[in-house]
Amino acid sequence: MPDGASSDHPAVQKQLDRLSLLSPGRDILGLERISAVMEKLGNPQNRLPPVFHVAGTNGKGSTCAFLRAAIEAEGLKCHVYTSPHLVRFNERIRLAGHLIADDYLAELLEHVLDSSSDIAPSFFETTTAAALLAFADTPADACILEVGLGGRLDATNVVENPVATGIAALGIDHESFLLAPEEGTPSEPMVRIAWEKAGIAKPGVPLLTQHYPEKMDDVIAAHCDSVGALYLPRGEEWHAAIYEAQLHYRDAHGRVNLPLPDLVGSHQADNAALAVAMLRHQDAVQVSESALKAGMGWAQWPGRMHLLMSGPLTGLLPGDAEIWVDGGHNVSAGLALAKHFADHEAGSIHLVIGMLANKNPSAILSPLKDKLASVTVIPVAGHDAHPASAFSEFRGQLREASDAAEALKGLHVEASATVLISGSLYLAGDVLKANHQVPD
């Protein structure tokens, strides 16, 4: 099944089964098919509430979460489209504050598939079309779209009139797609990544970005100039810094001091700052300073540096042992994990890892290696994953287990132990479901 999609609802599963048979796969880039699909549906992407469009390698989902939290803290209704889901497919489409209902989701998927059978859209193109159709037909004050892959050729880029666009942290990921040879594209990998993400820029629309190395910054600026977008990079058009336990933000409109985000990880302040910058550089959706402050605590992004609460999985370990879940799978994510656990002693963390076969095990293992007491390798249900032999660079206790529960049972740890389950968002979803923490 593409993207690990399944549903307990028979009508939804029927459409997902159809999609698995008809779709050529989710990672097919290009706007030709999605444009044709939208034309058959009456171009609902042109009837959306004010759109905030977010790209990036890491942090784009958290940025969307902060946007949503601030907008809802203002008392407004917001649509959100993100991917992938963790447990239920419905998590991808949030309508005016609520996850899309099963019956409506099944109806939308059926309509999109029936309307586009001669086009054979990909999994992601079909789900994007369904989301945009739902967003056009359901009243709301704002709409947040997370890019699925890249930016320039991503299906969400069929939306031509956002009120603000943003690019979060950048790194190397999805190399086979985003670094595929193509005439006229930058040759340096990170510059190419920046160029691909900059493809969401639109004429007359502000593009807010984090701070990047000069060559990456230059290629984004050049692209914005070529399409007539307003390039507003961090460090030039807006500024943010952490000191005295606050996030201090300033731009041409003034200053605002915000509480630090409740989301775990110092990098979340950067994601929050980008969301603030996007909101403050558009006029279609008015969000007050008090709502921005409330959003710092309201934002939720499950499966990313997520501390498990009491449940079936946590009950397998003694006392006050902590179990952290993070779906990170690339170098940037590994470095963020290492930063979060920097104060832990050497050999104090037990890693349970399940990583897809097309990802690099060193991305997570190398930054954490000195902190690890043991590594237990588990499969990722429904996906090809690395075996234990792929983690041979770790010279300590290396084990295998059939799933997260068996891995935890095999750990002989003290009551104060720290366990990290990481390597895949699909695995993170399985863990949350097993611990009865299904996102809502």
Image (cartoon, helix red, strand yellow):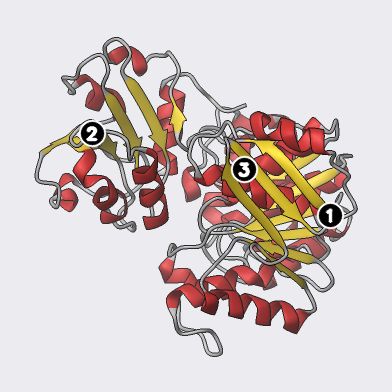
Instruction: Give the number of the mark in front: 3 or 1.
Output: 1
Element marked by disc 2? loop
Q: Is residue 312 left or right of residue 186?
A: left
Q: Which residue is mark 2?
A: 345
Residue 65 in picture, x, y percent from top left: 65, 40
In the rendered image, the residue lying farthest to the top is 319
**Of residues 176 and 253, the one drawn nearer to the viewer in this rendering:** 253
What type is the residue that disc 1 sits on?
A: His
What type is the residue that disc 3 sits on?
A: Gln
Residue 15, numbered label: 3
Residue 196 in picture, x, y percent from top left: 58, 72
Instruction: Give the number of the mark in front: 3 or 2.
Output: 2
**Of residues 238 and 82, the one drawn nearer to the viewer in this rendering:** 238
Q: Which residue is mark 1?
A: 253
Whether residues under marks 3 and 1 lie with C-beta atoms below 8 angstroms apart, the answer is: no
Element marked by disc 1? loop
Specify which label sits upstream in the sequence, 3 or 1. Answer: 3
